[in-house]
Amino acid sequence: MKRLWKTIILTTGLILGSSIVISDQIQPLLDVGEKRQKAEKSSQAKIDQMDDDTSLIVNEFKTVSKQIEGLRVYNAQMKQQIDRQEERLKEIDKTMKEAQVMQRQIPPFTRRMLSGIETSIELDLPFHLSERKERIAFAKAALDNPTVSPAEGLRQVLEAFEVEGEYGRKLDSYKDSIMIDGELREGNILRVGRLAMVFQTADETQTHGWNNKTRSWEELDGSYRNPTRKGIRIANRLATVDLLELPLQNAGEAK
């Protein structure tokens, strides 16, 4: 019996001893495994962080890329606008230079034009002479006034030119006096544009036509009395428009 207990105790001791030996040999392995797991967890955490950082960087890159592309489009548009503005500035510069040339040419041109109008009045039928000459004098004064711009001077001359042009398209009648046989007679002037100019005394007993070649009034025969009277009434809107037989150009030849 004692021998049996010795055997059991011995066996138990061997088992316990073996367990201690195995435990001492496994523990380092377990420690290594635990360290490896911690290292793997740490590495995974770093990998996850790097993945997050990479995703963030990629998103930022995409955002920046879109901004860059937007800036490229914007820059292209701005370049087009700048190019157009530069072209416009060139056109404006060219126009200004041309305007400066024209501005230098306006005064002599305006004076030549005014001189032509003045000569035309002198050679024209002698109607509304005071009014027409006053208009010419007013335009001359504007051209001689240094405070009046060339453009304003030109405007006044063009206005005079336009008025003179209108005279050629109007039927006109007004009271006036002319010399007949050394006597100043009052009456009515009838003017048909620049085609004819006739004078009839207030008592309608005498009718004279203007001869522009001789620059004088010449008496007309009695056949022009009624047409002249009727023309005066039409011009004053006292009668309806009708055909008139009047002397044209050389009134003296109609006698």
Image (cartoon, rainbow, N blue to C red):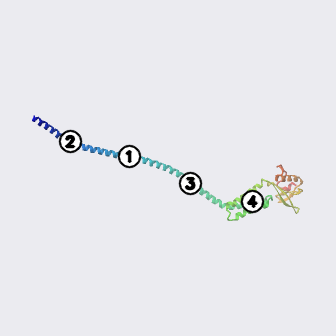
- Relative depth, front residue between 39 and 64: 39
Residue 166 image offset from top left, x and y in percent: 76, 55
Amino acid beneath label 2 = Ser
Residue drawn at x 72%, y 64% as measured from the top left:
141
Total residue callouts: 4
Question: What separation in Å lies between label 3 and label 1 (alpha carbons)?
Answer: 48 Å
Mark 2 crowdedness (10 Å alpha carbons): few <14, some 14-19, many ≥20: few
Q: Looking at this rendering, what residue extends furthest in the left direction?
A: 2
Q: Which of pointers 2 and 4 lies earlier in the amino acid sequence? A: 2
Q: Are marks 4 and 3 in contact (CB under 8 Å)?
A: no
Q: Secondary structure at mark 4?
A: helix
Q: Secondary structure at mark 3?
A: helix
Amino acid beneath label 4 = Ile
Residue drawn at x 17%, y 40% as measured from the top left:
16
Q: Which of label 4 and label 3 is nearer to you? A: 3
Q: Are marks 2 and 3 in contact (CB under 8 Å)?
A: no
- Relative depth, front residue between 45 and 198: 45
Q: Which of pointers 2 and 3 lies earlier in the amino acid sequence? A: 2
Q: Are marks 3 and 1 in contact (CB under 8 Å)?
A: no
| Vertical side of 11 occupied by 104: above or below | below
Question: What separation in Å lies between label 4 and label 3 (alpha carbons)?
Answer: 44 Å
Q: Which of pointers 1 and 4 lies earlier in the amino acid sequence? A: 1
Using the image, tell me which numbered label, if any, was put on residue 52. Answer: 1
Q: Quick check: 227 left or right of 69?
A: right
Question: What separation in Å lies between label 2 and label 4 (alpha carbons)?
Answer: 133 Å
Instruction: Give the residue at mark 3.
Output: 85
Residue 57 image offset from top left, x and y in percent: 40, 48
Instruction: Give the residue at mark 2.
Output: 23
